[in-house]
Image: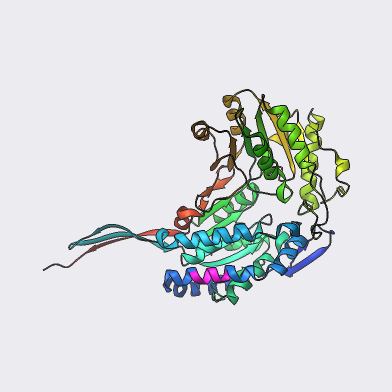
C-alpha cells in the first residue's frame, strides 16, 4: 500500500499521512460521482448555490483547526488567519453571478419557434489542487462547478494533505450529498490512469509546467476538457510617474508574501532609471522588516517555505545569479532563523539580467530581481521575454498609457497600481507555458459547462 505523506516545513517531520487509493477503489469513487450527478443537476440552481454557501460558512466555523493545520502543512504564519478572506470573496461572488452565468441565451421565442442556447454541466469534474493556496485555488473551481450541476472529485497536493478532507467535511456537514463532493488520495500513476481512461468530463489542474504536460499526455485522445494554470514569472514595471511608496509596498508584498509561493507573485521588477535608486533603497528597507520564524508564533510574519527542496531551488538560483555578477542587497544576518533548509531569508538582487535563470525561470520563493530601464519599449521587451504569461503589474498615473502597454504584454491579466490579486469578477487565465483555460467570472462558469442548443418548431394550426 502506498502511503502519501506530508513532511512539515516547521520541523521536518511527517505531520500527516494517508493511504493512496488503488485504481479499482478510485474507479468506484468516480462511479459514485457519476451516478449522483444527474440528481444533483436536477436540483434548482438556487438550491445548489445555497448548499455551496452553507459549506463555505461551515468551513469558516472550522478556522481554529484550519489555520494551524495550514501552518504545519505548508508554513503560512497563523498571523495571517488562513485564506478565508479570498476564499469567502470568491465563493460569494460566483454565487451572486450564478443565475446570470447559467441563464439561457434566447435567440427567439415566437409563435413559431423557440430557439435558445442553454448551459449544461460537463458531468464529473476532477480538481487537482496545489499546496501554495490550497483553499483559495481549489474553491475557484469547486464552487462554480458544484453550482453549475457538476459533481466534484478533489485531489490535493501531498504538501497539503488534510485540506481536501476539511473541505469535503465542511460541505457534507452543510448538506451537500457525500457522493456529489468527494476527496481522494491518489498517487501519480493512478491519477494518470484515471484521466487516460476518460473517467472525468473536465480536469482542472494548478501546478507546475511539467505537471501540466503530464495531464495533457494522460488526457491525449480522450477529448477531456482541461483547465491548466501552470508556471509564472510575473513582472512589475515602475514608470517615472509612479507613486513610489505605493509601488514599493505592493510589489515587495507581492514578491515575498507567503514566502514568495504565489502563482501571481512578483518575481522580476523593471524600474525607470529616474526612480531606480530610490525604489531599490526603499525595497530593501521594506523587506528587512520581516520576522522569519516558526509560523505557529503569532509574531512571525514570514514562515518557512513549504519544503526544503523548494528553498534549495531558490538558493541555487540566487547563487548562480551572484556568480554571474548579481548583487544581493538584504543582509542575511537580519534573519538568524534561516537554517539552510526550509527557513529562507528574503532577498533582493540587482545587477541582474536575462542571461540568469533567476530572471527567466520560476523562482517561487521570497526573492526578486530589480533592473533599471530607460523606456516603455525596453520594459515591454523585457516583460515579454519569458516563457510564462500570467500577470503583469504596471505602475503609473496614466490609465491610457497602462492600457496601451497592456495590449502589448503577453499575459492573461494586466494590473495597474496593484499586483498579486485575483479578482473573482474577472477571468483568471494565462498564456504561453502558464497554461490554458480560465476560472472565475462568467467565463469560469462557461468553462465548467457546455453549450446545448434547442431549436424547437412549435405546432401551429
Q: Can residue 53 be found in the magenta stretch?
A: yes
Prevailing secondary structure of the magenta residues: helix
Residue 421, x across and y down, in percent: 60, 48
Residue 232's quadrant in the figure?
top right
Residue 286's place in the image compared with 215, above or below, is above
Tell which residue pokes out farthest to the top in this image: 374
Residue 429 appears in the figure: yes
Residue 245, x across and y down, in percent: 67, 37
Which quarter of the figure is the C terminus placed in? bottom left
Residue 22 appears in the figure: no
- In front of the other: 144 or 28: 144
Highlighted range, magenta: 50-55
- In front of the other: 444 or 78: 78
Q: Which residue is rendered at x = 61% and y = 50% of the image?
A: 212
Q: Which residue is rendered at x = 76% and y = 57% of the image?
A: 77
Residue 270, x across and y down, in percent: 65, 31
Name the colour scheme.
rainbow
User: Does residue 111 appear to the left or right of 341 in the view shown?
Assistant: left
Residue 169's place in the image compared with 305, above or below, is below
Q: Can residue 454 be found in the magenta stretch?
A: no
Residue 131, x across and y down, in percent: 68, 57
> Count of labels shown?
0
Which quarter of the figure is the N terminus placed in? bottom right
Amino acid at each position: 500500500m502506498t502511503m502519501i505523506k506530508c513532511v512539515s516545513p516547521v520541523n521536518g517531520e511527517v505531520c500527516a499521512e494517508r493511504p493512496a487509493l488503488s485504481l479499482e477503489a478510485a474507479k468506484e469513487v468516480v462511479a459514485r460521482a457519476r451516478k449522483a450527478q444527474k440528481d444533483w443537476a436536477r436540483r434548482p440552481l438556487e438550491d445548489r448555490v445555497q448548499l455551496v454557501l452553507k459549506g463555505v460558512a461551515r468551513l469558516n466555523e472550522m478556522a481554529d483547526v484550519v489555520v494551524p493545520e495550514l501552518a504545519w502543512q505548508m508554513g503560512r504564519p497563523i498571523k495571517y488567519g488562513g485564506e478565508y478572506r479570498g476564499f469567502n470573496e470568491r465563493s460569494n461572488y460566483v454565487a451572486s453571478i450564478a443565475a446570470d452565468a447559467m441563464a439561457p441565451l434566447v435567440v427567439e421565442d415566437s409563435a413559431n419557434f423557440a430557439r435558445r442556447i442553454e448551459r449544461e454541466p460537463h458531468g464529473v469534474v476532477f480538481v487537482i489542487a496545489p499546496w501554495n493556496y490550497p483553499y483559495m485555488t481549489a474553491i475557484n473551481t469547486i464552487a462554480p462547478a458544484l453550482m453549475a450541476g457538476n459533481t466534484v472529485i478533489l485531489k490535493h497536493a501531498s504538501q497539503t494533505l488534510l485540506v481536501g478532507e476539511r473541505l469535503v467535511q465542511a460541505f457534507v456537514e452543510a448538506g451537500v450529498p457525500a457522493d456529489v463532493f468527494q476527496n481522494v488520495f491518489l498517487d501519480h500513476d493512478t491519477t494518470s490512469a484515471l484521466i487516460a481512461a476518460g473517467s472525468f468530463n473536465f480536469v482542472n489542474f494548478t501546478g507546475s509546467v511539467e505537471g501540466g504536460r503530464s495531464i495533457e499526455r494522460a488526457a491525449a485522445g480522450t477529448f477531456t476538457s482541461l483547465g491548466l494554470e501552470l508556471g509564472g514569472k510575473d513582472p512589475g514595471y515602475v514608470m517615472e510617474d509612479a507613486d513610489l511608496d505605493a509601488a514599493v509596498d505592493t510589489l515587495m508584498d507581492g514578491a515575498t508574501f507567503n514566502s514568495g509561493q504565489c502563482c501571481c507573485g512578483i518575481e522580476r521588477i523593471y524600474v525607470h532609471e529616474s526612480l531606480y535608486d530610490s525604489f531599490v533603497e526603499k525595497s530593501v528597507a521594506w523587506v528587512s522588516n520581516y520576522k522569519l520564524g516558526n509560523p505557529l508564533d503569532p509574531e512571525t510574519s514570514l514562515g518557512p517555505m513549504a519544503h526544503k527542496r523548494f528553498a534549495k531551488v531558490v538558493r541555487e538560483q540566487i547563487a548562480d545569479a551572484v556568480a554571474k555578477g548579481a548583487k544581493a542587497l538584504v543582509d542575511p544576518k537580519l534573519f538568524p532563523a534561516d537554517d539552510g533548509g526550509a527557513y529562507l531569508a528574503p532577498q533582493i538582487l540587482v545587477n541582474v539580467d536575462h542571461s540568469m535563470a533567476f530572471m527567466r525561470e520560476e523562482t517561487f520563493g521570497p526573492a526578486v530581481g530589480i533592473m533599471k530601464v530607460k523606456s516603455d519599449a525596453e520594459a515591454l521587451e523585457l516583460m515579454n521575454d519569458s516563457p510564462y504569461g500570467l500577470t503583469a503589474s504596471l505602475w503609473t498615473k496614466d490609465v491610457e498609457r497602462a492600457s496601451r502597454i497592456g495590449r502589448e504584454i503577453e499575459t492573461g491579466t494586466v494590473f495597474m497600481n496593484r499586483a498579486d490579486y485575483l479578482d473573482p469578477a474577472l477571468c483568471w487565465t494565462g498564456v504561453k507555458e502558464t497554461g490554458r483555460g480560465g476560472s472565475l467570472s462568467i467565463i469560469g462558469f462557461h468553462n465548467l459547462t457546455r453549450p446545448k442548443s434547442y431549436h424547437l418548431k412549435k405546432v401551429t394550426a
